[in-house]
């Protein structure tokens, strides 16, 4: 099953970082957030990716090439002037252990990745449309290249199949940014941090779609979150998978710093990879 990742936006609200790199390459814990997203999917058995490129797409290509070349073991024979890259993850005793898109013995990602140029100014829907050759034959997943969560993607897929609609969106409740004031006249009578339950459900990405969804997208100028999703909802073809655990996007420097703080504390909530999962 293909996983489409929208990684072409300019990330203007994170200009402190995105002036020199595309947002999917902004690092959390020394790794690009794109890497974290792909690890999440691979953990659940989904390791076949189509990455929609746009702004500074060449940077993402270089990162992926370096990730392939520099992970795993290298044997350099200076006498013979040769380099052997052991991408199969053999360790010192000649054995390796490979499972579900991640070679835990050698620490090598073994994802299948299509890096697809979709235009620097193309909108989100247009990027999905341009991935049609990779998505048209079967159920596929879509998410944004700037958000992480501890979503159970296998349960999400089962939910989608159970409901039999064309598209499923993961609904989340955002972390609040401000405290709530109760005011009587000029006097503050109470103050408390707003809980996520005080907000309504919002689009958290992590979609599952059938190929017919591509017919709802007209072209490059189509915004996925507008006409296509609105039309799917009107047609009764969009259902919501409620995820009430951790979710966080990275639109601003503050949100990037929050994710870094969670990583630095150890056991960040979205780091679910590491255990064996069945492949789909």
Image (cartoon, rainbow, N blue to C red):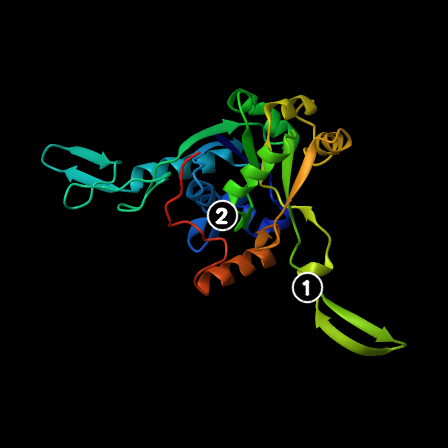
Q: Nearer the viewer, residue 280 or 144?
A: 280
- The disc placed on residue 195 is 1
Please tell me which residue is depicted at 61% across the width and 42% down the height of the picture: 205
- In this picture, residue 160 sits left or right of residue 71: right
Please tell me which residue is depicted at 75% across the width and 28% down the height of the picture: 235
Look at the image and tell me whether residue 126 can be seen. Answer: yes
Residue 114, horizontal then vertical, whole percent: 45, 28
Residue 192, horizontal then vertical, whole percent: 71, 72
Residue 241, horizontal then vertical, whole percent: 63, 43
Look at the image and tell me whether residue 22 can be seen. Answer: no
- In this picture, residue 183 sits left or right of residue 3: right
Residue 36, horizontal then vertical, whole percent: 46, 47
Whether residue 190 is situated above or below residue 85 in the rendered picture: below
Mark 1 or mark 2: name the one nearer the start of the chain.
Answer: 2
- In the displayed image of the protein, which residue is found farthest to the left? 79
Q: Could you say which quadrant of the image residue 218 lies in?
A: top right
User: Which element carries disc 2, helix, strand or loop?
Assistant: helix
Please tell me which residue is depicted at 84% across the width and 74% down the height of the picture: 183
Please tell me which residue is depicted at 53% across the width and 57% down the height of the picture: 259
* Whole-number angstrom distance, CA of label 1 to CA of label 2: 25 Å
Query: What count of labels does the image hold?
Result: 2
Whether residue 116 is situated above or below residue 205 in the rendered picture: above
- The disc placed on residue 33 is 2
């Amino acid at each position: 099953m293909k996983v489409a990742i929208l990684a072409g936006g300019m990330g203007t609200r994170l200009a402190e970082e995105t002036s020199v790199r595309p947002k999917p390459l902004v690092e959390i814990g020394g790794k690009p957030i794109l890497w974290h997203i792909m690890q999440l999917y691979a953990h659940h058995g989904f390791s076949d990716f189509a990455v929609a490129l746009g702004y500074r797409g060449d940077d993402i290509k270089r990162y992926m090439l370096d990730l392939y070349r520099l992970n795993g073991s290298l044997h350099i024979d200076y006498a013979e002037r040769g380099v052997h890259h052991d991408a199969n993850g053999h360790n010192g005793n000649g054995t390796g252990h490979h499972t579900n898109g991640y070679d835990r013995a050698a620490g090598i990602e073994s994802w299948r990745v299509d890096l697809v140029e979709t235009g620097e100014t193309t909108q989100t829907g247009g990027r999905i449309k341009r991935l049609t050759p990779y998505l048209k034959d079967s159920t596929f997943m879509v998410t944004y290249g700037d958000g992480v969560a501890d979503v159970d993607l296998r349960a999400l897929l089962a939910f989608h199949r159970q409901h039999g609609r064309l598209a499923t969106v993961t609904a989340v409740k955002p972390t609040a940014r401000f405290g709530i004031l109760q005011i009587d006249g000029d006097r503050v009578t109470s103050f408390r941090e707003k809980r996520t339950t005080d907000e309504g459900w919002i689009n958290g990405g992590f979609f599952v779609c059938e190929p017919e969804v591509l017919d709802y997208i007209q072209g490059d100028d189509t915004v996925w979150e507008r006409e296509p999703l609105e039309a799917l909802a009107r047609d009764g073809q969009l259902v919501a998978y409620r995820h009430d655990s951790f979710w966080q996007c990275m639109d601003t420097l503050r949100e990037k710093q929050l994710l870094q703080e969670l990583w630095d504390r150890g056991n960040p909530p979205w780091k679910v990879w590491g255990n064996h999962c069945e492949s789909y």
